[in-house]
Amino acid sequence: MPTILRKFAESVLRLNTFIGQKVSWLSFALVLLIGLDVTLRYVLGMTRIWVIELETYLFSLLFLLGGPWTWARDEHVRVDIFYTQKSPKQKRRINLFGHLLLFLPWTWILMQVGWQFFYESWLIREGSAQAGGLPALYVIKFAMLLGFVLLFLQGVAHTLLLLLNWNQTEDSSWQH
């Protein structure tokens, strides 16, 4: 059973790594788009709503779909006031507590809310409320749902690896 659980956790890590690496290229596209927007606005005196909304969409995709990969790599923001001074055993306890009592329940709730946002938006084929804005607002709401699903799966994978590696002596308890 531990082998199956480890393989599941590693497959989640591979999935989030694949998606995160692909989505990371959106940052390049976002920089180019913002450069275009600034040029249009300040050089030519033109503003396009669809450009501004596309910037928001790209940033949202980058954040929502890249977040699980960032967490998988342990490069997320953490309040390190107390955490860094703890022993590996204390860190494992803090992580397990955080995963089981905070992270997994909240991401589960956010998946439920994300599903409702997406489904209701998709039913009415929601688009931008702005004239000249982008259609298909439900696409970004689906990305929100997908981001929370991937984050939840990464949380399950972290928790499994944390438990499978419970007795190890080094600091990175969920790494393999």
Image (spheres, helix red, strand yellow):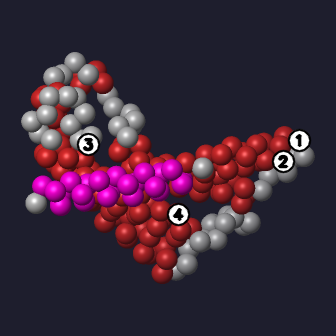
Magenta stretch: helix, strand or loop mostly: helix
Residue pointed to by mark 3 = 176
Which corner quadrant holds the C terminus? top left
For mark 4, give the secondary structure: helix
| Mark 2 or mark 4: whose residue is earlier in sequence | 2
Q: Residue at x 47, y 56 (%)?
A: 19
- Who's the residue at 69% across and 53% down the image? 52
Q: Residue at x 72, y 56 (%)?
A: 51
Is residue 139 within the magenta segment?
A: no
Secondary structure of the residue carrying numbered label 2: helix
Whether 9 is drawn above or below 39: the answer is: below
Q: Amino acid at mark 2?
A: Leu
Question: Mark 2 or mark 3: which comes first in sequence?
Answer: 2
**Mark 1 surroundings within 10 Å by alpha-carbon count, few (fewer than 14), some (14 through 19), many (20 or more):** few
Sequence-first tag of 1 and 3: 1
Span highlighted in magenta in the image: 2-23
- Contact between marks 2 and 3 (CB within 8 A): the answer is no
Which residue has dot 1 on it? 43
Q: CA distance from mark 1 to mark 2?
A: 6 Å
Determine the secondary structure under disc 3: loop
- Return the residue at label 2: 40
Residue under circle 4?
140
Q: Which amino acid lies under the numbered mark 1 shown in the image of this protein?
A: Val
**Hey, which residue is sitting farthest right in the picture?**
44
Reading the chain from its start, which is encountered first: label 4 or label 3?
Answer: 4
Q: Tell whether 55 sits left or right of 41.
A: left
**Mark 2 crowd level (few <14, some 14–19, many ≥20, 10 Å Cα):** some
Mark 1 and mark 3: Cα distance apart in space: 52 Å
